[in-house]
Amino acid sequence: MGNAISTVLRGATLHHIGFVVQSIARTAQEFADAIGAHWDAKVIYDPLQQVRVTFISRGAPAPLIELIEPAETKSPVSNFVSAGGGLHHLCYEVAALDDELRFARSVGNLVVKRPLPAVAFGGRRIAWVFTRQKLLLEYLEATLESVAATDND
């Protein structure tokens, strides 16, 4: 089983760590200051996911920090924020999204959200996977440039 897990993430890159917050406006700068990072104050509304997101950066190669707030009462993160919010998911950039999802299912993981375009990533597709270990993973479809860079490593 150990080999199967490493296969699903082979060539994948930790892209960001997602935190659910009640308010980006009230949280982002303090969050950035607490970890010595930069926040550009850009907030993106994603109507398909019914959330607003922003990214905090410590610079490459560190993964981004994503702050997520519900944009509507029926947002998928509304209950999470009502319970206090916090660490929500890890996002991996993957070269072959559909292959990774097939593999995730084959090892007993649950695909909880099928691929859909994400506004925050220029329309690249994302999908959500809940592992048997109760970890929520977001898979982000890699760009051609990032796949080429991984192949050259």
Image: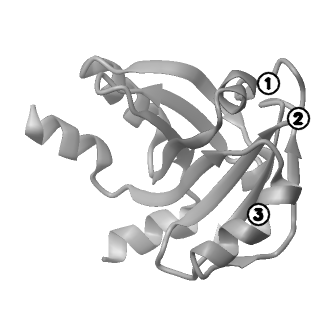
Q: Secondary structure at mark 1?
A: loop
Residue 77 location (% of width, % of height): 70, 29
Position of the C terminus by quadrant: bottom left
Foreground mark, 1 or 3, reads 3
Horizontal and vertical percent for residue 47? 88, 33
What is the distance, in whole Å, between disc 1 and disc 3 at their CAs? 20 Å
Residue 138 location, x and y as percent?
Answer: 52, 40
| Residue at numbered disc 2 | 71
Q: Secondary structure at mark 3?
A: helix
Q: CA distance from mark 2 to mark 3?
A: 16 Å
Q: Amino acid at mark 1?
A: Ser
Q: Tell me how the rendering is colored.
A: one colour
Residue denoted by label 1:
75
**Sequence order check, earlier mark of 1 and 3:** 3
**Circle 3 sits on which residue?**
28
Instruction: Find residue 26 and report its horizontal and vertical position in percent.
Output: 85, 57
Q: Residue at x 54, y 30 (%)?
A: 128
Extreme residue toward the front, this view:
84
> Residue 6's mark?
none
Q: Answer yes or no: do the residues labelled 1 and 2 have beta carbons within 8 Å? A: yes
